[in-house]
Protein backbone atom coordinates (compact mmCIF):
# COMPACT_ATOMS: atom_id res chain seq x y z
CA UNK A 1 0.00 0.00 0.00
CA UNK A 2 1.35 3.39 -0.93
CA UNK A 3 1.01 6.29 1.43
CA UNK A 4 0.73 10.00 0.77
CA UNK A 5 3.31 12.43 2.12
CA UNK A 6 1.70 12.51 5.55
CA UNK A 7 1.06 8.84 6.03
CA UNK A 8 -2.44 8.84 4.59
CA UNK A 9 -2.94 5.48 2.93
CA UNK A 10 -3.85 6.11 -0.70
CA UNK A 11 -5.67 2.78 -0.83
CA UNK A 12 -8.16 4.04 1.76
CA UNK A 13 -9.60 6.26 -0.93
CA UNK A 14 -12.94 4.99 -2.12
CA UNK A 15 -13.06 2.18 0.41
CA UNK A 16 -16.48 1.79 1.99
CA UNK A 17 -14.88 1.50 5.43
CA UNK A 18 -13.56 5.02 5.19
CA UNK A 19 -16.68 7.11 5.02
CA UNK A 20 -16.20 10.71 6.13
CA UNK A 21 -19.87 11.63 5.79
CA UNK A 22 -23.03 9.72 4.93
CA UNK A 23 -26.57 10.70 4.03
CA UNK A 24 -29.23 8.01 4.34
CA UNK A 25 -32.72 8.68 2.92
CA UNK A 26 -32.08 12.32 3.66
CA UNK A 27 -35.08 14.55 2.98
CA UNK A 28 -35.57 18.27 3.26
CA UNK A 29 -38.89 19.99 2.77
CA UNK A 30 -39.23 23.76 2.90
CA UNK A 31 -42.56 25.43 3.65
CA UNK A 32 -46.01 23.90 3.93
CA UNK A 33 -49.10 23.29 1.82
CA UNK A 34 -49.10 24.98 -1.55
CA UNK A 35 -45.72 26.61 -1.06
CA UNK A 36 -44.06 23.35 -0.05
CA UNK A 37 -40.78 22.57 -1.80
CA UNK A 38 -39.13 19.16 -1.60
CA UNK A 39 -35.50 20.22 -1.85
CA UNK A 40 -34.08 16.76 -1.05
CA UNK A 41 -36.03 13.58 -1.74
CA UNK A 42 -34.55 10.59 0.14
CA UNK A 43 -30.93 11.12 -0.83
CA UNK A 44 -28.43 8.42 0.12
CA UNK A 45 -24.76 9.03 -0.54
CA UNK A 46 -21.36 8.37 1.03
CA UNK A 47 -18.48 10.81 0.89
CA UNK A 48 -15.20 8.95 1.15
CA UNK A 49 -12.27 10.00 3.26
CA UNK A 50 -9.28 11.57 1.49
CA UNK A 51 -11.37 11.97 -1.62
CA UNK A 52 -12.44 15.07 -3.55
CA UNK A 53 -16.11 14.88 -4.54
CA UNK A 54 -17.94 17.42 -6.68
CA UNK A 55 -21.70 17.89 -6.57
CA UNK A 56 -23.34 19.10 -9.75
CA UNK A 57 -26.85 19.62 -11.03
CA UNK A 58 -29.18 22.28 -12.39
CA UNK A 59 -29.99 25.35 -10.35
CA UNK A 60 -32.52 24.48 -7.65
CA UNK A 61 -31.68 20.76 -7.71
CA UNK A 62 -30.78 20.75 -4.01
CA UNK A 63 -26.98 21.02 -4.07
CA UNK A 64 -26.68 23.72 -1.41
CA UNK A 65 -29.40 22.12 0.68
CA UNK A 66 -27.56 18.80 0.69
CA UNK A 67 -24.36 20.51 1.71
CA UNK A 68 -26.06 22.56 4.44
CA UNK A 69 -27.82 19.50 5.88
CA UNK A 70 -24.60 17.45 5.85
CA UNK A 71 -22.69 20.28 7.51
CA UNK A 72 -25.24 20.79 10.26
CA UNK A 73 -26.10 24.28 9.01
CA UNK A 74 -29.71 23.31 8.39
CA UNK A 75 -32.09 20.81 10.01
CA UNK A 76 -33.30 17.78 8.07
CA UNK A 77 -36.95 16.77 7.55
CA UNK A 78 -36.27 13.03 7.44
CA UNK A 79 -33.54 10.43 7.22
CA UNK A 80 -30.07 10.75 8.59
CA UNK A 81 -26.91 12.80 8.12
CA UNK A 82 -23.65 11.62 9.65
CA UNK A 83 -20.19 13.06 9.96
CA UNK A 84 -17.88 10.14 10.71
CA UNK A 85 -19.75 8.16 13.36
CA UNK A 86 -21.78 11.11 14.61
CA UNK A 87 -25.46 11.31 13.74
CA UNK A 88 -26.29 15.01 13.33
CA UNK A 89 -30.02 14.67 13.80
CA UNK A 90 -29.52 13.47 17.36
CA UNK A 91 -27.40 16.41 18.51
CA UNK A 92 -28.57 19.34 20.60
CA UNK A 93 -27.54 22.87 19.62
CA UNK A 94 -24.49 22.93 21.82
CA UNK A 95 -23.08 19.67 20.51
CA UNK A 96 -23.93 20.58 16.95
CA UNK A 97 -22.03 23.87 17.30
CA UNK A 98 -19.08 22.00 18.75
CA UNK A 99 -19.11 19.44 15.95
CA UNK A 100 -19.25 22.16 13.31
CA UNK A 101 -16.37 23.95 14.97
CA UNK A 102 -14.16 20.91 15.50
CA UNK A 103 -14.91 18.63 12.55
CA UNK A 104 -16.18 20.69 9.66
CA UNK A 105 -14.59 23.33 7.44
CA UNK A 106 -16.64 25.59 5.18
CA UNK A 107 -15.73 27.57 2.12
CA UNK A 108 -18.33 29.83 0.56
CA UNK A 109 -18.51 31.70 -2.72
CA UNK A 110 -17.97 34.99 -0.86
CA UNK A 111 -14.62 34.77 0.89
CA UNK A 112 -16.03 36.12 4.20
CA UNK A 113 -12.68 37.42 5.44
CA UNK A 114 -12.48 40.14 8.08
CA UNK A 115 -10.96 43.21 6.37
CA UNK A 116 -9.14 44.55 9.43
CA UNK A 117 -7.28 41.31 10.13
CA UNK A 118 -4.17 40.05 8.35
CA UNK A 119 -4.28 36.84 6.31
CA UNK A 120 -2.75 34.89 9.19
CA UNK A 121 -5.16 36.39 11.73
CA UNK A 122 -8.07 35.44 9.47
CA UNK A 123 -6.74 31.90 9.17
CA UNK A 124 -6.46 31.38 12.93
CA UNK A 125 -9.60 33.34 13.86
CA UNK A 126 -11.94 30.34 14.39
CA UNK A 127 -9.35 28.72 16.66
CA UNK A 128 -8.71 31.98 18.50
CA UNK A 129 -12.44 32.32 19.15
CA UNK A 130 -12.62 28.73 20.36
CA UNK A 131 -9.57 29.30 22.58
CA UNK A 132 -7.65 26.56 20.84
CA UNK A 133 -3.95 26.70 20.07
CA UNK A 134 -3.18 26.06 16.42
CA UNK A 135 -1.02 23.03 15.73
CA UNK A 136 2.00 24.99 14.48
CA UNK A 137 3.38 22.26 12.23
CA UNK A 138 0.04 21.66 10.58
CA UNK A 139 -0.55 25.37 10.14
CA UNK A 140 2.84 25.84 8.50
CA UNK A 141 2.09 22.98 6.15
CA UNK A 142 -1.30 24.38 5.25
CA UNK A 143 0.12 27.84 4.61
CA UNK A 144 2.88 26.40 2.48
CA UNK A 145 0.59 24.12 0.47
CA UNK A 146 -1.79 27.00 -0.10
CA UNK A 147 1.14 29.11 -1.30
CA UNK A 148 0.57 32.02 1.07
CA UNK A 149 3.85 32.05 2.96
CA UNK A 150 4.82 35.50 1.69
CA UNK A 151 1.37 37.01 2.17
CA UNK A 152 0.53 36.30 5.78
CA UNK A 153 0.84 39.91 6.96
CA UNK A 154 -1.28 41.27 4.13
CA UNK A 155 -4.86 42.35 4.68
CA UNK A 156 -7.60 41.04 2.39
CA UNK A 157 -7.72 44.24 0.28
CA UNK A 158 -4.01 43.77 -0.49
CA UNK A 159 -4.67 40.31 -1.93
CA UNK A 160 -6.15 39.15 -5.24
CA UNK A 161 -9.49 37.32 -5.28
CA UNK A 162 -7.73 34.00 -5.72
CA UNK A 163 -5.40 34.71 -2.81
CA UNK A 164 -8.32 35.76 -0.62
CA UNK A 165 -10.14 32.54 -1.38
CA UNK A 166 -6.97 30.59 -0.61
CA UNK A 167 -6.89 32.34 2.77
CA UNK A 168 -10.49 31.18 3.26
CA UNK A 169 -9.47 27.63 2.32
CA UNK A 170 -6.51 27.77 4.72
CA UNK A 171 -8.87 29.01 7.45
CA UNK A 172 -11.20 26.05 6.81
CA UNK A 173 -8.22 23.67 6.91
CA UNK A 174 -6.44 25.14 9.91
CA UNK A 175 -8.49 23.25 12.47
CA UNK A 176 -7.80 19.98 10.61
CA UNK A 177 -11.45 19.19 9.95
CA UNK A 178 -12.86 15.72 9.22
CA UNK A 179 -14.42 17.13 6.11
CA UNK A 180 -14.53 20.38 4.14
CA UNK A 181 -17.61 21.60 2.34
CA UNK A 182 -17.26 24.21 -0.38
CA UNK A 183 -20.28 25.79 -2.09
CA UNK A 184 -19.26 27.25 -5.47
CA UNK A 185 -15.83 28.28 -4.11
CA UNK A 186 -14.68 29.55 -7.50
CA UNK A 187 -17.95 31.29 -8.40
CA UNK A 188 -16.48 34.77 -7.83
CA UNK A 189 -13.10 34.12 -9.41
CA UNK A 190 -11.67 34.48 -12.89
CA UNK A 191 -10.55 31.19 -14.43
CA UNK A 192 -6.89 31.56 -13.47
CA UNK A 193 -7.62 32.34 -9.81
CA UNK A 194 -10.23 29.60 -9.86
CA UNK A 195 -7.62 27.14 -11.08
CA UNK A 196 -5.31 28.17 -8.21
CA UNK A 197 -7.99 27.48 -5.63
CA UNK A 198 -9.06 24.19 -7.23
CA UNK A 199 -5.45 23.07 -7.49
CA UNK A 200 -5.03 23.80 -3.84
CA UNK A 201 -8.19 21.96 -2.84
CA UNK A 202 -6.90 18.95 -4.73
CA UNK A 203 -3.49 19.25 -3.03
CA UNK A 204 -5.17 19.35 0.36
CA UNK A 205 -6.71 15.98 -0.48
CA UNK A 206 -3.61 14.46 -2.08
CA UNK A 207 -0.93 15.82 0.27
CA UNK A 208 -2.79 16.40 3.52
CA UNK A 209 -5.35 13.60 3.28
CA UNK A 210 -8.28 15.96 3.62
CA UNK A 211 -11.80 15.16 2.48
CA UNK A 212 -13.47 17.75 0.26
CA UNK A 213 -17.05 18.00 -1.00
CA UNK A 214 -17.56 20.86 -3.45
CA UNK A 215 -20.65 22.18 -5.18
CA UNK A 216 -19.96 23.64 -8.61
CA UNK A 217 -21.73 24.26 -11.90
CA UNK A 218 -18.47 24.38 -13.84
CA UNK A 219 -17.42 21.13 -15.61
CA UNK A 220 -13.77 22.23 -15.54
CA UNK A 221 -13.94 22.75 -11.77
CA UNK A 222 -15.61 19.35 -11.39
CA UNK A 223 -12.79 17.70 -13.37
CA UNK A 224 -10.40 18.46 -10.48
CA UNK A 225 -12.43 16.06 -8.32
CA UNK A 226 -12.10 12.28 -8.05
CA UNK A 227 -15.82 11.84 -8.37
CA UNK A 228 -18.91 13.78 -9.42
CA UNK A 229 -22.35 13.20 -7.91
CA UNK A 230 -25.22 14.60 -10.02
CA UNK A 231 -28.43 15.87 -8.47
CA UNK A 232 -31.73 16.67 -10.20
CA UNK A 233 -35.00 17.52 -8.47
CA UNK A 234 -33.58 16.65 -5.07
CA UNK A 235 -32.43 13.18 -6.07
CA UNK A 236 -29.11 11.65 -7.05
CA UNK A 237 -29.28 10.73 -10.70
CA UNK A 238 -25.68 9.85 -11.50
CA UNK A 239 -22.30 9.17 -9.96
CA UNK A 240 -19.17 9.50 -12.11
CA UNK A 241 -15.59 8.55 -11.19
CA UNK A 242 -12.39 10.13 -12.57
CA UNK A 243 -14.40 12.81 -14.39
CA UNK A 244 -13.11 14.79 -17.33
CA UNK A 245 -14.55 18.21 -18.18
CA UNK A 246 -15.94 16.79 -21.45
CA UNK A 247 -17.66 13.84 -19.80
CA UNK A 248 -19.19 16.14 -17.17
CA UNK A 249 -20.35 18.60 -19.82
CA UNK A 250 -21.97 15.76 -21.81
CA UNK A 251 -23.78 14.59 -18.71
CA UNK A 252 -24.99 18.10 -17.90
CA UNK A 253 -26.43 18.45 -21.41
CA UNK A 254 -28.82 15.61 -20.65
CA UNK A 255 -30.64 17.77 -18.10
CA UNK A 256 -33.53 19.50 -19.84
CA UNK A 257 -34.40 23.17 -19.43
CA UNK A 258 -36.50 22.45 -16.35
CA UNK A 259 -33.54 20.78 -14.73
CA UNK A 260 -34.97 17.30 -15.03
CA UNK A 261 -32.86 14.43 -16.16
CA UNK A 262 -33.60 12.84 -19.50
N1 LIG B 1 -34.76 28.60 2.82
C1 LIG B 1 -35.53 28.12 1.84
N2 LIG B 1 -36.87 28.26 1.86
C2 LIG B 1 -37.65 27.76 0.88
N3 LIG B 1 -37.19 27.10 -0.18
C3 LIG B 1 -35.87 26.93 -0.28
C4 LIG B 1 -34.97 27.43 0.72
N4 LIG B 1 -33.70 27.10 0.35
C5 LIG B 1 -33.80 26.44 -0.82
N5 LIG B 1 -35.10 26.33 -1.20
C6 LIG B 1 -35.61 25.64 -2.40
O1 LIG B 1 -35.11 24.31 -2.39
C7 LIG B 1 -34.72 23.91 -3.71
C8 LIG B 1 -33.24 23.53 -3.70
O2 LIG B 1 -32.47 24.72 -3.45
P1 LIG B 1 -30.88 24.72 -3.39
O3 LIG B 1 -30.43 23.62 -2.51
O4 LIG B 1 -30.47 26.10 -3.02
O5 LIG B 1 -30.50 24.40 -4.90
P2 LIG B 1 -29.11 24.54 -5.67
O6 LIG B 1 -28.03 24.85 -4.67
O7 LIG B 1 -28.92 23.23 -6.37
O8 LIG B 1 -29.29 25.64 -6.66
C9 LIG B 1 -35.06 25.08 -4.61
O9 LIG B 1 -36.32 24.85 -5.18
C10 LIG B 1 -35.08 26.25 -3.68
O10 LIG B 1 -35.95 27.26 -4.17
MG1 LIG C 1 -26.77 26.51 -4.45
Image (cartoon, rainbow, N blue to C red):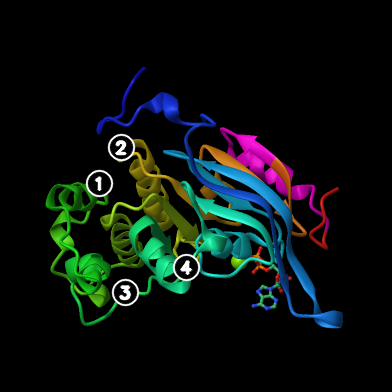
Task: State the residue in front, 80 or 16.
Answer: 80
Query: Which residue is denoted by mark 2 in the rendering?
Result: 207
Q: Nearer the viewer, mark 1 or mark 2?
A: 2
- How far across and how far down the image is residue 241, in percent? 60, 33
Q: CA distance from mark 1 to mark 2?
A: 8 Å
Q: State if disc 2 and disc 1 touch (CB < 8 Å).
A: yes
Q: Quadrant of ligand 2?
A: bottom right
Helix, strand or loop under label 1: helix
Q: Is residue 22 left or right of residue 136?
A: right
**110 left or right of 130?**
right
Q: Residue 79 placed where, x, y %?
A: 68, 56
Of labels 2 and 3, earlier in sequence is 3
Q: What residue is drawn where x is 37% and y is 44%?
A: 210
Residue 90 is situated, as x and y percent measured from the top left of the image, at 54, 62
Q: Residue at x 18, y 66 (%)?
A: 120
Q: Which residues are magenta?
A: 239-256
Earlier sequence position, callout 4 versus callout 1: 4
Task: Name the residue carrying label 1.
Answer: 145
Q: Residue at x 45, y 39 (%)?
A: 49
Label 3: how many Cα within 10 Å (few below 14, some 14–19, many 20+): many
Q: Secondary structure at mark 4?
A: loop
Q: Specify whether 229 is left or right of 102.
A: right
Amino acid sequence: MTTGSFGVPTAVRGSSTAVAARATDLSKVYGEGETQVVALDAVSVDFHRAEFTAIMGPSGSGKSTLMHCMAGLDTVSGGSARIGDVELTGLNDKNLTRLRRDKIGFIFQAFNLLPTLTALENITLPMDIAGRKPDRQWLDMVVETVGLSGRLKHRPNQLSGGQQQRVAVARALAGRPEIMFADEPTGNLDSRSGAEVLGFLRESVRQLGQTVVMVTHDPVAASYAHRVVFLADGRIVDDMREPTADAVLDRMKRFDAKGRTS
